[in-house]
Amino acid sequence: MTTEKKVLLRDSFYAAVIFAVVFGVIETYMVSVPFAAITAPIGGILFGVFIYFFAGSKTVARQTIIDSNGEEIILSGRANHFKGAEAVGGKLYLFKDRLEFKSHGFNIQNHQQRIDIADITAVIFYSSLGIIPNGLQITTKSGVVEKFVINGRKRWKEEIEQLQAGN
């Protein structure tokens, strides 16, 4: 099993557990504890399986491919890019001179965005929902702040800063 599939499996498991807990708490208050004890785990499992197959689908992979024109891709991975309140799903790519995000077609705000490494003034960590340590915030020279949720944010930050030091 590839590292990417292992990460997808892990993330799907976490999504299933979080969904089951939240769903269980809501159902406990709306219906009853015995009902929630049965349906929440089932709902969590179904949600996790859906996430695994959706995020790992060939359709999503095809929609998020960027033509690298033979350039080396230093890092790439599934990501969410915050556009207002929407966490737009897609894939983030790091090249030696730029960061590129390409969304998949199942979003409201489909887009592709490029941030030149030379334009980045700050790369800092943040926590999604204030508690989940998986965010990377990029600030540009023009003061624009872009937020991404990614796996391995420490490595992304290190690679971006290393590229900045080389410029």
Image: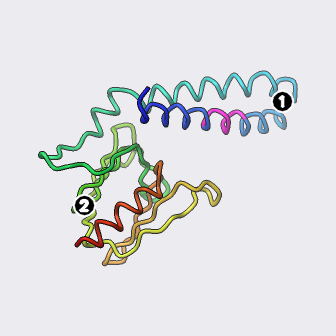
Question: Is 69 located above or below residue 9 in the figure?
Answer: below
Question: Is 66 located above or below residue 12 in the figure?
Answer: below
Question: Is 141 located above or below residue 76 in the figure?
Answer: below
* Label 2–label 1 contact, CB within 8 A: no
- Check residue 19 for magenta coloring: yes
Category of crowding for the residue at label 1, using alpha-carbon neighbours closer than 10 angstroms: few (below 14), some (14–19), many (at least 20): few
Residue at the disc numbered 2: 98
> For this rendering, which residue is in front, 103 or 75?
75
Q: Quadrant of the N terminus?
A: top left
| Magenta residue span | 15-20
What is the three-letter code of the residue carrying label 2?
Arg
x, y percentage for residue 114?
A: 26, 59
On the picture, is 98 further left or further right than 29? left
On the picture, is 111 further left or further right than 122? left
Query: Residue at the right extreme?
Result: 33
Q: What element carries label 1?
A: loop
Which labelled disc corresponds to residue 159?
A: none
- Kindly report the secondary structure that dominates the magenta region of the rendered protein: helix
Q: In which quarter of the image is the C terminus?
A: bottom left
Residue drawn at point x = 45 percent, y = 59 percent: 84
x, y percentage for residue 134?
A: 53, 54
x, y percentage for residue 129?
A: 61, 56
On the picture, is 16 further left or further right than 92? right
What is the three-letter code of the residue carrying label 1?
Val
Residue drawn at point x = 47 percent, y = 58 percent: 154
Residue at the disc numbered 1: 31
Q: Distance between the residues labelled 2 and 1?
A: 51 Å
